[in-house]
Image (cartoon, helix red, strand yellow):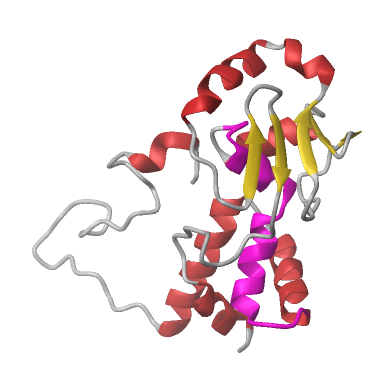
Amino acid sequence: MLKGGRCYTPKCAVDRRGKPPGKQTATATRRRISDRGIQLREKQKARYSYGLMERQFRRLFANAERQPGITGENLLVLLERRLDNVVFRLGFADSRSQARQLVQHGHITLNGHKAGIPSQFVKEGDTITWRPESTKTEYYKTVAETVESKVLPSWLNLDRATMTGKMVALPTPADLDVKFNEKTIVEYYSR
């Protein structure tokens, strides 16, 4: 989620601890968080896990609001369709920030064209591959060895021999395993 495998250990920064930080005293109790605070926390969780700035996230939410259907589900689908997220889901990177860097440095192609914009949306039927120049790097060789053990979502397909990924269908909210509640994000923005 944040930095690769860190959130699979007990030291995950997103998980809540039972006590506040600092010296523990007998009177150290947490105050009840308001509804607005809970909504803000959920929005920040979504932003941080996808590595977006506030303006990008707000623009994405406005995009989801304009689409027909449920706004929260539209937001999830738009977040999953970003190129850096698709590269992460294909197993080409260990984290979304690493996938973002791969795209920005020009190692990934989208439909045969060099893609340098991580926020670019991937459509159904698009193919994601490595640039031929990037297949000679040490990183590519380690990814090619470790990609065998990674599990792909049902809406993506990967040819492990050629390291070519394809979006076979648009992601549905049932396919996604998110650690935040999209309904509270909608409530946050609709105040």
Answer with the quarter of the image where residue 188 lies.
bottom right
Residue occupying image coordinates x 51% and y 22%:
146
Q: Compared to 136, does 89 lie above or below?
A: below
Q: Compared to 20, does 108 lie above or below?
A: above
Numbered circles on residues, count: 0
Viewed as shown, does residue 22 lie left or right of 159? left
Q: In the rendered structure, does residue 57 fall within the stretch colored magenta? A: no
Answer with the quarter of the image where residue 94 lies.
top right
Image location of residue 50, percent across then percent down: 60, 52
User: 76 or 20, which is in the foreground?
Assistant: 76
Majority secondary structure of the magenta segment?
helix
User: 59 or 148, which is in the foreground?
Assistant: 148
Residue occupying image coordinates x 77% and y 55%:
124
Residue occupying image coordinates x 74% and y 61%:
56
Q: In the image as oriented, which residue stretches furthest toward the left?
A: 26
Q: Tell me the quadrant of the picture where the C terminus can be found.
A: bottom right
Magenta-drawn segment: 67-93
Viewed as shown, does residue 185 lie left or right of 11? right
Residue occupying image coordinates x 55% and y 48%:
153
Q: In the rendered structure, does residue 78 fall within the stretch colored magenta? A: yes
Image location of residue 63, percent across then percent down: 77, 73
Image location of residue 18, percent across then percent down: 21, 59
Q: Compared to 28, does 188 lie above or below?
A: below
Image location of residue 176, percent across then percent down: 52, 59
